[in-house]
Image (tube, rainbow, N blue to C red):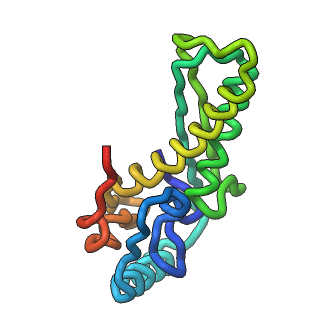
């Protein structure tokens, strides 16, 4: 679930922050679409005001046999993926939390440092990608608390032509 107080969108380009550094070609929205999205959000902020509490909750999981301390480290490094995709992150009005799960199905090698580092890096990468997918899949909400358009509502021309892959 992505309901961050920070932004998932680069205000200069309209690109989702989580798309940077993936090796995939960046396809920014047209300047007209990005400007229209900014105007719409500013109008809604004027109507709604501030004071909302937010949170982003994530779970990263592996089949590796991790100790409790290693799983805790995985949750901590996965927060780096959250920080790649949401800026700023971990604000006072955020309850950002990442849980790590390990099934224990695959033992780590006797000298596990390299394997564990790979798992930690993959956790951060996976979480950044998951935020992008969640933002793209989200639908806007219009309710008693106000109108909250989704990325797809604001950047429909870009969302329609983006391929998230498998």
Of 82 and 40, the residue lying toward us? 82
Assign the C terminus to one quadrant of the image: top left
Q: How many marks?
A: 0
**The quadrant where residue 98 appears:** top right
Q: Is residue 126 above or below residue 9?
A: above
Q: Is residue 17 above or below residue 1?
A: below
**Residue 46, percent from left and from top:** 50, 80
Relative side of 119 to 143, left or right: right
**Residue 123, percent from left and from top:** 58, 37
Residue pictured at 40% horizontal, 81% vertical: 34
Q: Is residue 143 above or below residue 46?
A: above
Residue pictured at 52% horizontal, 11% vertical: 105
Q: Is residue 62 above or below residue 46?
A: above
**Residue 20, percent from left and from top:** 53, 63
**Residue 101, percent from left and from top:** 57, 23
Of 165 and 148, the residue lying toward us? 165
Of 158 and 119, the residue lying toward us? 119
Relative side of 15 to 106, left or right: left
Relative side of 76 to 55, left or right: right
Of 116 and 39, the residue lying toward us? 116
Residue pictured at 27% horizontal, 70% vertical: 156
Q: Residue furthest left?
A: 160
Residue pictured at 75% horizontal, 18% vertical: 111
């Amino acid at each position: 679930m992505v309901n961050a107080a920070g932004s998932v969108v680069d205000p200069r380009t309209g690109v989702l922050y989580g798309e940077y550094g993936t090796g995939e070609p960046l396809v920014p929205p047209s300047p007209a679409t990005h400007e229209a999205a900014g105007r719409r959000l500013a109008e809604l902020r004027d109507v709604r005001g501030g004071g909302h509490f937010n949170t982003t909750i994530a779970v990263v999981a592996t089949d590796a046999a991790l100790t409790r301390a290693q799983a805790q480290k995985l949750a901590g490094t996965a927060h780096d993926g959250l920080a790649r995709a949401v800026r700023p992150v971990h604000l006072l009005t955020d309850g950002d939390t990442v849980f790590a799960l390990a099934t224990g199905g695959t033992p780590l090698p006797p000298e596990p440092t390299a394997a564990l580092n790979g798992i930690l890096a993959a956790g951060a990468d996976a979480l950044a990608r998951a935020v992008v997918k969640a933002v793209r899949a989200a639908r806007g909400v219009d309710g008693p608390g106000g109108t909250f358009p989704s990325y797809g509502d604001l950047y429909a021309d870009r969302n329609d032509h983006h391929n998230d892959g498998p």
